[in-house]
Amino acid sequence: MASLRDIKTRINSTKKTSQITKAMEMVSASKLNRAEMNAKSFVPYMEKIQEVVANIALGSSNATHPMLIKRPVKKTGYLVITSDRGLAGAYNSNVLRAVYQTIQQRHQSPDEYAVIAIGRIGLSFFNKRNIPVVLNITGLPDQPSFADIKAIASQTVNMFADGTFDELYMYYNHFVSAIQQDVAEKKLLPLTDLATTKKSASYEFEPSQEEILEVLLPQYAESLIYGALLDAKASEHAARMTAMKNATDNAKELIRTLTLSYNRARQAAITQEITEIVAGANALQ
Amino acid sequence: MMKTIKVSVVTPDGPVYEADVEMVSTKAKSGELGILPGHIPLVAPLEIGALRLKKDGKTELIAVSGGFLEVRPDKVTVLAQAAEKAEDIDVVRARAAKERAEQRLQGKQDDIDFKRAELALKRAINRLNVAGTK
């Protein structure tokens, strides 16, 4: 059995670890709250832009735009959203595994695809496996504003427009609830699934439908990317919160068993001392 | 009592402005545009510029960086990637952005960077204009 002092040290260090994980859990909980609020304030914008896009795209069949048209796929882009830091349970590995498997299944040579990495963990994952990363952004704040990703979003959309990619997928963790996040695969470009059931006013267009689509569709695609990022951030905080909660619970359990064996060892020591004293006294009689 | 129309300005970071006004005017890609209550449904892309909202005899300004305008008989919605009310504009930051863009324009670079710097300059000047007239 380990000595009393050894056990005491372990209890102390485990206690300190649990304090840290507890603090991280609470930090993530408050960040999750704010991330959910951010996602909520984005909803009206997204709904509105979706409505207008659908209205224009469905309203008349003669309005076309390169971003709406499917073309033969020579190269596929994957936009992958991960976190910058670990300690978030399976958050990153789930997404990365999904992307990696898809790439392995769909493509034979690295000329057929390229990755756009958001987040440091994803970037180093792809670099390590020699998967081409064309664009990356790291060090995004926990509550990203649209301006933070404007540059990479518009570059990504441009790469589709100029023919670098023929289709573009997004991979990220979709926030279901505080304890559940699912890997989501979304086809971002070309925009083929614009179908909505509600059809409202038909518009006048100033100057013309084509020119409006020219402005509207890139903006729409960029907002989809931003929406995915907000979703992913909420998932990240939720995943980290859960991971840290588990860590805290485990530490508590460990402290409990260690305290038990500490008390046992102490009792054994006392018993031994008494036995020795009694034996000594008996010997003197 | 004048007739009013509801205006909301929304950006990805949340709603910026919401009120009933008497008239909305702004610069669209195709030229100046004025909207009064009861306008027919319309969609128009916007220039980087100021959105002027007439309300109770006063004019409020909002700096808008592009995006577009959707008009319905009872409501005007502006969807922009960035928009700020005059009093919310960070003048120091806008001035710094303007200088940065000017420097970049002076250096000789390829077309894409040039275009981006030009847009950045436009946005910065627009912000300063809107903030300055307040």
Image: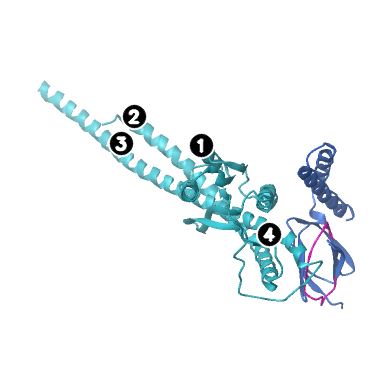
Chain colours: A cyan, B blue
Question: Of callouts 3 and 1, which one flags the residue occurring earlier in the amino acid sequence?
Answer: 1
Reading the image, the residue beneath label 4 is: A66
For the C terminus of chain B, give its image quadrant.
bottom right
Residue at 60% in and 47% down: A142
Q: Chain of mark 1?
A: A
Question: Of callouts 1 and 4, which one flags the residue occurring earlier in the amino acid sequence?
Answer: 4
Q: How far across and down, in percent of the image, does residue A111 sit?
A: 56, 44
Q: Chain of mark 2?
A: A
From the viewer's side, name the closer residue of B43 and B35: B43
Rendered image: mark on residue A5: 2
Which mark is in front, 2 or 4?
Answer: 4
Crowd band around label 1 with a 10 angstrom C-alpha radius: few (<14), some (14–19), many (20+): few
Gap in angstroms between the C-alphas marked 3 and 1: 45 Å
Q: Amino acid at mark 2?
A: Arg
Which mark is in front, 1 or 4?
Answer: 4
Q: Quadrant of residue B5?
A: bottom right
Instruction: Give SS at disc 2.
Output: helix
